[in-house]
Image (spheres, coloured by chain):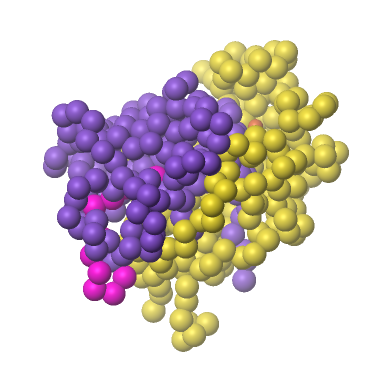
Chain colours: A yellow, B purple
Amino acid sequence: MSASATTPFRDITPGSQPPNDFPEYGSTHRRHPKLPLLRIPQTVTETTGPRFTRAQYPAMIDMSRIGGREAVGERIVVRGRVLDENGRPVPDTMIEIWQANAAGRYAHERDQHDAPLDPNFKGEGRVFTDAEGWYEFTSIKPGSYPWRNHFNAWRPNHIHYSLFGPGFATRLITQMYFPGDPLLELDPIFHSVPDEAARNRLIAKFDIEITRPEWALGYRFDFVLRGRETTAMEE
Amino acid sequence: MPIATASQTIGPYWHLIEHPEFADLTRFGAAGERITLTGRVIDGDGAPLADGCIELWQASPTAGETFPGYGRAAADRDGRFRFTTIRPGPLPGPGNAQQAPHFALSVMARGILTRLVTRAYFAGEALNETDPILSLIEDPARRATLMAHPAGTDTWHIDIRLQGEGETVFMEF
Ligand SMILES: [Fe+2]
């Protein structure tokens, strides 16, 4: 017997999530609550959540070209699974994707970085997992970009993700990084995750099996969403 | 057992996935009492959360083909956001308790590493007095931070303060 749609989700594992106040990331200073969060029981509001359908939210699986015209940069395929904390696949869930172009510039009016825009790259994607929790999309590798957090601050290459999962409690906004990036060691947003293993799980793995001959480099990246509590019987 | 992936900030450029129509939960033809929820988000300096992303989720009425139950809005330069939706009804709570009608809200932005979650209730609603979540808050002034107030025809407004005087009650679960 599997968990029902209103079974509460497991508690958050200590150290696996960033704190609200993280002085090395200056913008948290005036944007974090100073009073303790109110611990509430999970009600139907927290245990259930929206459903997104491909009909109402059309997929955008290839970010590497617009109208058949190729974006500049190193073409990549990102593939992986969305699982829950019980190790079960999360099927038919929506993943939203956004990123800078190969030069490290967002197609966003407030991005003033002096790097070129690419008319063939918008930087938005949207995919759904299949019945076994697998997803895949094509893009180009995003460039690093400077930001004003501290002197000579540069964000490591990263892709932003938004996932919903089965309940309001499983909502996840995160970023995926690339292996071997020397900027990771210096990045306060990456380092805001206290547990080293949890932090390193944000780094994709190069995967020759996902790599397409003479076409695109492949990266593997899995997401884990909060899992529902299970009874001793199930374990 | 695998552990849930770490949250990271939504950053200042999340508008690449913004679709203004997401803020209208009635766009698929939902039936019910149509209302508008407006709000304004300010930080610890009283400055507007001008790059913020506000999401709304309501478990009532039940989400389905014509009603997503979910909406997303961008805060404008003054920190203001607006949703058009269907007025929620009461919901079951823990045990035999009944929850007063409410919206769940997520606030995300640059400088927010993990989304901040709060609720918006309807000021003056009789069920608020016995709501099991509101009852967890002893200080009436703090409870009041979760109240949306009438602001014109079929319109309700809530102020969200991230930090400092009048700080909104944010929740974990
Ligand atoms: Fe970014």
Q: Which of A116 and B48 is in front in this view?
A: B48
State the image coordinates of residue B51 (x, y, percent, origin top left).
52, 27
Q: Give the range drawn in magenta.
A: B94-105
Work out whether A119 lies above or below A200: above
State the image coordinates of residue A122 (x, y, percent, origin top left).
56, 22
Image quarter in which the N terminus of chain A is found: bottom left
State the image coordinates of residue B9 (x, y, percent, origin top left).
60, 40
Badge count: 0
Q: Horizontally, is B20 left or right of A61 in the view?
A: left
Q: Residue at x 64, y 64 (%)?
A: A14
Ligand 1 quadrant in view: top right
Q: Which residue is drawn at 45% across and 22% down?
A: B78
Is residue B133 in view? no
Q: Horizontally, is A7 left or right of A15 in the view?
A: left
Is residue B159 in view? yes
Work out whether B171 lies above or below B70: below
Q: Which residue is drawn at 51% across and 68% down?
A: A10
Work out whether A177 lies above or below A226: above
Q: Nearer the viewer, residue A4 or A17?
A: A17
Q: Nearer the viewer, residue A128 or A145?
A: A145
Q: Which residue is drawn at 54% across and 56% down?
A: A36
- As for residue A69 lying within the magenta part, the answer is no
Q: Which of B121 and A168 is in front in this view?
A: B121
Task: Give the image quarter of residue A56.
Answer: top left
